[in-house]
Amino acid sequence: MKTVLITGSSRGIGRAIAKRLAKDYKIIINYKQSKDKAHALVKELRKVNPYVIAIKADVTKEDEVENMFRIGEKNFSHVDILVNNAGMSQFSLIQDTSLEDFRKLIDTNLTSVFLTSKRAIPSMVRQNYGVIINLSSIWGSLGASLESIYSLTKGGINSFTKALSKELAPSNIRVNAIAPGIVDTDMMRGDFSKDDLDKLRADLPFRRFADPSEIADLVEFLISDRASYITGDIVDINGGFY
């Protein structure tokens, strides 16, 4: 049974991914602040799989990333699959974005991907096997007004994914990104009012947002052997919005 580490997985898309994979993989749930939610998820998933643990770590900090992997490896020997899901958004005009906010977005959405990937790769190289999935966004390709820095970070993830896939293909390690459109998550509901959300839905072909479970379904496919020839791709899942 392969081991999957999912960053930022106590809620939202990360939680849905953990739930989807729990029957077939050893699961490492990562959280930063939501201890109660993370441990409640562990309890839920252990009903179908005893090989589930939760580890607290701020994935923007190298020492905490190192500790997270050490605990994961102590429990499950090695990490076979890394899902870089941790992220944040900010909805503001560029002139209202402080340098502190800019750096926080860069660290949360980009530095974390660098640190976790760098730490996971040596073991994957030794095994001659590994999969890395990076959670991007539709705005990484299109760009979003009032989300310029968020768009910057997701565009960076796209470029990093393409470059890293070429670097790691000789070691049989696949790297892909998933670029969702608008997903029904707590983060999304926190950024917009109900009226704004209704207007957004009206602009979508399906007249609804994606459910986190639909993103999890795509992750499940991309980490499987059925996707063994897919690497370096930015896979869109946006209900026809783009």
Image (tube, grey):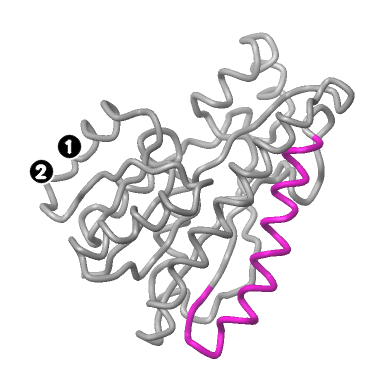
Residue at 26 percent across and 44 percent down: it is: 54
Give x and y (percent) for residue 94. Answer: 86, 28
The stretch drawn in magenta includes residue 150 = yes
The structure residue drawn at horizontal position 24% and vertical position 52%, both measured from the top left corner, is 22
In the picture as drawn, the residue positioned furthest to the bottom comes out as: 170
Q: Which residue is mark 2?
A: 47
Q: Which residues are magenta?
A: 148-174
Q: Quadrant of the N terminus?
A: bottom left
Kindly identify the amino acid type of the residue bearing the numbered disc 1. Answer: Glu
Q: Label 2: few (<14), some or many (≥20) within 10 Å? A: few
Task: Name the side, left or right, on which 120 lies relative to 39.
Answer: right
* Residue 13 disc label: none
- Disc 1 designates what residue? 44
In the figure, 33 relative to 196: above or below?
A: below
Q: Is residue 111 above or below residue 35?
A: below
* Outermost right residue: 95
